Image (cartoon, rainbow, N blue to C red):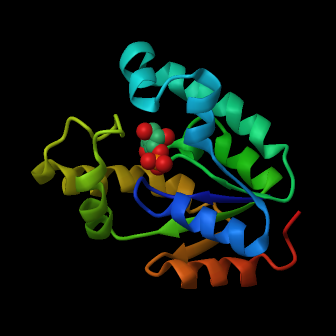
Amino acid sequence: MITLIGYMGSGKSSVGKALASKLGLAFCDLDDEIEFQSGRDIAFIFKNYGEFFFRKLERKILKEQLHKTNSILSLGGGTPCFYNNIDLINKQSTSFYLQSTPTILQSRLEKEKEARPIISSLDNNELLAFIEHNLVERKKYYSKAKHVIINTDLAQSVNQIITLSHENIH
Ligand code: S3P
């Protein structure tokens, strides 16, 4: 099992899908699985049940997904940063942190804020400062990933992950 972690907008889903298709492995996006299992979208869950409820559900579904083998799992931006999720992730998978700069993240996220409750109420001027601040907090967790990939080019990231995980796809 390979897991992809990183901030919102870091390319976890795109890289995950491309990687799975190149390796002929199954792909799962944790957010999609949460929405599928709960029958609600992420924004609805945050708005109506709150973040604490979401984090508990996220952890439960993370644990289930980590039992799978021969697959690629893209996590939510916050998944490694709550409870001891990062330890579970590292115990049961080979983890890759997809790193991007705050400026790149900002330009991607400006267009995709609506579905992301953590940033949906920020205006575009506030977004960069929020990302910079939030990344300082989250780097403590992201940097525990087994490998770091500087994600600037999708095909290059996919190839780097394949090279680095050569012995570890299980
Ligand atoms: C979150 C990231 C989102 C989703 C939720 C919370 C976060 O996933 O899990 O909106 O706390 O960073 P993506 O990173 O896939 O956008």
**Quarter where residue 168 is shown:** bottom right
Left or right relative to 90: residue 33: left
Q: Nearer the viewer, residue 14 or 67?
A: 14
Q: Provide residue 31's location: percent of width, then percent of height.
A: 55, 40
The answer to whether 95 is drawn above or below residue 148 in the figure is above
Q: Nearer the viewer, residue 28 or 8?
A: 28
Task: Report the image quarter containing ligand 1.
Answer: top left
The answer to whether 141 is drawn above or below residue 55 in the figure is below
Q: Provide residue 61's location: percent of width, then percent of height.
A: 69, 32
Image quadrant occupied by the N terminus:
bottom right
**Quarter where residue 45 is shown:** top left
**Residue at figure coordinates x 44%, y 55% from the top left:** 7
Image quadrant occupied by the C terminus:
bottom right
**Residue at figure coordinates x 56%, y 63% from the top left:** 143
**Residue at figure coordinates x 55%, y 31% from the top left:** 35
| Residue 77 visible in the snapshot | no
Q: Provide residue 38's location: percent of width, then percent of height.
A: 59, 22
How many numbered marks are there?
Answer: 0
Residue at the extreme top: 48
Q: Provide residue 28's location: percent of width, then percent of height.
A: 67, 49
Q: Nearer the viewer, residue 94 or 159?
A: 159
Left or right relative to 29: residue 62: right
**Residue at figure coordinates x 34%, y 37% from the top left:** 118
The answer to whether 36 is drawn above or below residue 77 in the figure is above
| Residue 170 visible in the snapshot | yes
Residue at the extreme left: 125
Left or right relative to 70: residue 110: left
